[in-house]
Structures are given as C-alpha cells and as structure tokens.
Image (spheres, coloured by chain):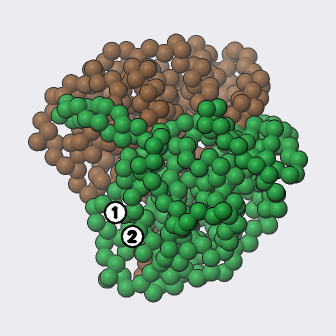
Chain colours: A green, B brown
C-alpha cells in the first residue's frame, strides 16, 4: 500500500543520528547530533551488485531505485520480494525474471572500474529510449517549493552533513528523502516511484546538491522533466540536459535562479517583489558538501 | 622540480570553466561561468584502474594520489613516468615495479562493485600500519586559514559547484586544489605530496566538504594528523578518526567550530572576540553539494 503523502524526513527517528560528545571553540564540552553512515549491500536475486554508504532508512526504496537507475530492473520487471537484513546490512531484491549481470559488472570494471564510471556508463545506455514530456513549470511553484523545503524539519537542519532530494508536483512536496550517500537520496525517490507506480511526467525533482551529469541522467532515467537546485551546474550536466530536453534550474536563492536548459517549460507567473530575498536560515540549506 | 608555493587555484585558466547562456528569474538572457566535468581514465602501467569525473587540471597529481590512496602505489615505488593524453582523456602511471591488480579489482567488484565500496575496502586494508604523529594545532592557525581560504580567488567563488581541499602548515596555505569530482581534490593533494616528497606530520588538511569516513581515511592514509572543515560530520567518520587518533574539526563558521576527535592536539590561543562572526561572503563558502 502507498504511504500517506507527503512523506517527510523524521529527524527523531531512532538510528539515523547519534549524539556525540566533543568540545567547542571555547573548550566547553558539548554534545551534538551526527548523522549515521553505514554500508548496505544490495543483491539482485542471487547476485551481489553494490555496497552503498547510506544513512540507513528506506533500504527497500534505495535498492529498488538504485537497480532501476542502473537499468538492471526493467519497467516491466515483476518484483516478487524485497528482504532487508538489518544485522547483515544487506537487502535482496527478487524478480520473476532471471537476472544475471556478471558480464555487465565485469565489463564495467574493465572499462571504468568505479561507480561514477559504472553508473554513468550504464545510464547512458539506458537513455536512448528516454523522451521527456512537455510540461508546465510555474515560477510560483518553484518559490513555494523552495520555501517549504528550506523550512520543513529535516535531518539537514538537525545534524547537517546530508543531501536532500524532493519529489514535487506543482507547488506540493510529495516525497522528501535525505541521505549521507551522494546519490542515495535520489535513488530512494526512484524506488518509491517504481514501487508505487507514480507517474513522472508531471513531477519536479528538487535537490540540495549540484547539477552534475549524473544527477541529470538519473532524473531523465526517472522520466522527470524538471530538475531544480539551489546549487550550481557542471558544463556536462547542462549539455546532457539540453540533449534530453530536460529543464534545468540552478542557483535558486530567494527570488534568484538561473535556467540553463529547457527554458520553454518556464512560466514566470510569480511576483518577484513578493518573493523577496531568503533569510539567514534559508541560506544555510545546502551548505554541506 | 617543485612548483613555487603557495599553489593556488587559477579561475582564469582556460578549459576549467565554460561560459553558458541562459535566463534568470526575470527572463533576461544571461551568461554564467560553469565548471567543466570530464572523464579521466587512470592506468597503472598496462592496467586500466578507474575512470574519474574531474575538472581536468593536474591529471598527473590526480592519478598519483588516487593510486597512492588506493594502496596501489607503495611509499617506495619508483615512478618512471606519467603520460597524460588530453585527447584520449587518459593518464598512465609507470612504475619500476611490475604491478597487477586484476585480482584485487575483480575481488572488489564482487564484494562491493562500486568506487565508494572499493575505495573504502582498499583503504581500510592500507590503514593497519598508519600511526599519526603528535602535533600542535593552534586555533589562531585555524582561524587564519579559514579567513584566507574563504577569500582567496577560486573556481568556487567564480563558478561554484566544486569542492576545495587545502594543504596547510601552521597558518600558511601551501596547496589549494579544487575539483568537481567528490574526492579528486584530496587525491590531487596526495599526488602533489607524493611527487614532491612533502612531509605530512606537520600539516593540516582543510576541506570544504563533509567529514565522512572516506575523507577521514584518505587523510590518515596521507599521514596528516589534522582534518578541518566548515561542513559537518558523519558518525562513522568520527569513529574512525578516534580509532586512528586523527584530530577532526568541523562546522567551522566564523569563530565557531566543533572538535569531535583528537582534542589533545588543540591549543586555544586565539582571541575569540577578535575573530568575530563570518560575513556573508564567507558564509557562501561550501554552499555547494
């Protein structure tokens, strides 16, 4: 069954952060909340695929989304089970179809040997078929979303050192995932969408992170036509977005933003004067690697 | 020969950024500088090891540092040549010793299958021998370094969407590397140190990024006893720093910071009142993923 929306971060969920003792600049002993970081090994049927460093929530969505964004799970695959073992730190995704990516994994090692290369290589393969739908993107939605995302309770605001990715529709926040692992937050969103058959064509993806080639490719793989961030761009990320016809919005701060691809979807309906500049608290958002 | 120090970012170096046209919130056409992101495939002798996504400067340092931090280059290895081919986007490191990591790479793929896991697995292996020297860390140095690093001309200030890692000694900035790739900046520092036989025991490593297990492990592998950042911690990063006796300083903003490991090296000699809070410009630093 589908969880109630919006699905938001719960900074008080046990096991996501740990209180650690230390000292501040004055030498006073203090205790601060620090995010957890632990390995999760993802299996597809009998085959070990990857070990991700993750904060540990939603291992089922993370596994599904990772495999989907790798092109190892097909749109039409029937998932017969997902078994998570918290002690062994493993999650096994079972499909009706027999799968074997031995060759693929070995090949990837030879040709690239690292997840960035692997993910990238795999995903470029998956992109031939991708076409992103025409969609409308109102600036009033963007500003409303940024306002909500910057102020909603989150692990970021509680402990920092974490990435956030948010699935949105018009001005509504639907699913807000956070993770210490670089691309786990977006993979968890992909897993949620796959698991609950969420249509992608009318969605907006918001991330606290940079708009790199990998983020753009993952967003396109998910079929989402709009990717927005308060952070900056890389040239290759912009190039790929333009090739795929994805709308790419970056450097969102207060009323300011830059659109470097897919401008045609933008409808500037917001009253900029009413938006104003962001306050200090907002400025903190995304202030982590 | 050793380049003159300090070795600082050159935002005007051709090929590191690209001017791209887009539109701002008002619909006005604008042109902004965006950092490049390109693949670089690293070979060790005849063997292809990894493809890194990098901004593209110092490919020789990046290759050396990556291989060293992977434990594939030993302290005593004689590097007989480093050949970079800009067109093929490859760099080949040649050593007097015959090397073969076929087994290692295959094993890593089976057991982890991604760079995070691979890097992590490899590095934990390399750490048994590591012991970090007793060293003095004056807070006056930390504040002086933060002030310089936050205001030195950099690709970050020019184009954003990039990580910075800085090798420091006392209050002096020695080598300031930036890269779009997550850990390339620190690997480039490691390559510089290996190439020019720079002693590590009296150094401080400053990063704009988060203090994850991987950053802590890389710093320890390099033999540097102090790692500081304006960003936050992960619990595992702190745990490993405590095990290795590495001094870990995070959340450096203005006069504020938190020390969660290696407190014994800290000497609080700075006049906090004189340090004051950081201004807006400083606050921008590290405001990227």
Q: Give the left or right position of residue A126, taking residue B276 as reference.
A: right
Q: Which residue is mark 1?
A: A282
Question: Where the N terminus of chain A falls, by quadrant?
Answer: bottom right
> Are dots 2 and 1 in contact, CB under 8 Å?
yes
Hey, which quadrant is residue A211 in on the image? bottom right
Q: Nearer the viewer, residue B66 or A286?
A: A286
Q: Residue at x 67, y 68 (%)?
A: A198
Q: Which residue is mark 2?
A: A147
Question: Residue B254: where, in percent of width, then height?
Answer: 23, 46
Question: Residue A85: where, in percent of width, then height?
Answer: 65, 37
Few, some or many residues within 10 Å of mark 1 (<14, 14–19, 20+): some
Asked if residue B50 shows in the view, the reply is no
Q: How many marks?
A: 2
Helix, strand or loop at mark 1 = helix
Q: CA distance from mark 2 to mark 1?
A: 8 Å
Instruction: Tell me the subunit letter for badge 1.
Output: A
Q: Nearer the viewer, residue B65 or A178?
A: A178
């Amino acid at each position: 069954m589908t969880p109630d929306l919006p699905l938001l971060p719960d900074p008080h969920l046990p096991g996501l952060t740990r209180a650690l003792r230390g000292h501040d600049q004055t030498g006073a002993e203090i205790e601060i909340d620090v995010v957890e970081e632990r390995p999760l090994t993802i299996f597809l049927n009998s085959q070990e695929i990857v070990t991700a460093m993750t904060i540990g929530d939603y291992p089922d969505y993370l596994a599904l989304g990772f495999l989907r964004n790798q092109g190892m799970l097909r749109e039409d695959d029937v998932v017969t089970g997902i078994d998570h073992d918290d002690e062994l730190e493993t999650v096994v995704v079972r499909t009706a179809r027999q799968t074997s990516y031995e060759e693929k994994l070995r090949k990837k090692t030879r040709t690239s040997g690292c997840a960035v290369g692997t993910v990238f290589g795999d995903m470029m393969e998956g992109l031939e078929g991708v076409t992103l739908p025409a969609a409308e993107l109102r600036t009033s939605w963007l500003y409303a979303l940024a306002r909500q995302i910057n102020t909603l309770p989150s692990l970021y605001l509680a402990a920092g050192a974490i990435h956030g990715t948010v699935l949105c529709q018009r001005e509504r926040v639907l699913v807000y995932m956070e993770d210490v692992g670089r691309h786990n937050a977006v993979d968890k969103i992909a897993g949620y969408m796959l698991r609950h058959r969420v249509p992608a064509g009318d969605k907006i993806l918001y991330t606290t992170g940079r708009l790199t080639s990998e983020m753009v490719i993952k967003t396109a793989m998910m079929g989402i036509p709009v990717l927005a961030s308060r952070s900056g761009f890389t040239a290759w990320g912009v190039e790929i977005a333009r090739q795929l016809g994805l709308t790419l919005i970056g450097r969102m701060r207060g009323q300011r933003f830059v659109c470097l691809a897919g401008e045609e979807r933008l409808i500037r309906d917001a009253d900029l004067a009413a938006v104003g500049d962001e306050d200090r608290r907002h400025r903190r958002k995304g202030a982590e690697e």
